[in-house]
Image: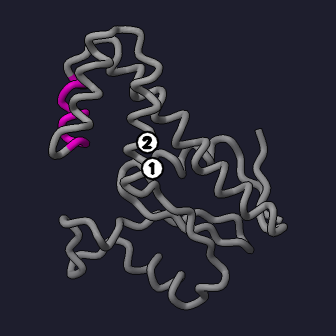
Amino acid sequence: MIMLTTDQIKEIAEQLDCGFSCFLNKNKNELIFLYSDENEFFDPSEDAWADERKKIKKKPKDYLEIEKMESRDSFRLMEAFINTVDSDKLRNDLTLALNLRKPFSNFKYVIDGSGEYRQKWFDFKAERMREWVKEQVDMFNAGGIIEYEE
């Protein structure tokens, strides 16, 4: 069994939120973060993570991938945050932002100009990202693979 600490859960959540992929070595309790291939800024000729990619490719069965949220999950996260907002105007502005073309950009634009709610959004999102990681850990736990510590 692998034990993940609260700090490791937090680190995984933060890296996933920054666009990295996370791989956990089941045998060594080692975390490897790779910049996602799907990112438009990724340049394979300048792969700073080549050694880590080789490690994973060499023994893929030793690694578990902790997956980032898909777009629909991120959208639901924004909707859930809107439900916590006590300002009618901001709640309406954020709801409208999600119903327009480019909802992620629009939400970011509105939240960036929302004063104290901007930090509330970051705190809410960080907590939900940690919960997302814990849910995946719990799925692995159900298979008897990983545990985490508080």
Question: From this viewpoint, which residue is outermost toward the bottom?
Answer: 58
Residue bearing the label numbered 2: 76
Q: Is residue 121 left or right of residue 2?
A: left
Q: Residue 122's spot in the image, x, y percent?
A: 40, 29
Give yes or no for residue 138 being in the magenta stretch: no
Instruction: State the extent of the magenta-drawn residues as a range.
Output: 103-112
- The quadrant in which the C terminus is found is top right
Q: Main secondary structure of the magenta part?
A: helix
Q: Residue 1 bears which disc, if any?
A: none
Query: In percent of the image, x 74 and y 55: which residue is there?
Result: 138
Point out residue 116 in the picture as x, y percentages from the top left corner.
Answer: 33, 11
- x, y percent for residue 34: 41, 67
- Separation of marks 2 and 1 at Cα, in angstroms: 5 Å
Residue sitting at x 17%, y 39%: 100
Disc 1 residue type (three-letter) = Asp
Q: Residues within 10 Å of mark 2 (few under 14, many from 20)?
A: few
Numbered marks: total = 2
Q: Label 1 near label 2: C-beta < 8 Å?
A: yes
**Looking at numbered disc 2 in the image, what kind of residue is underneath it?**
Arg
Helix, strand or loop at label 1? It is: helix
Disc 1 designates what residue? 73
Q: Is residue 108 magenta?
A: yes
Point 23% across, 37% down: residue: 99
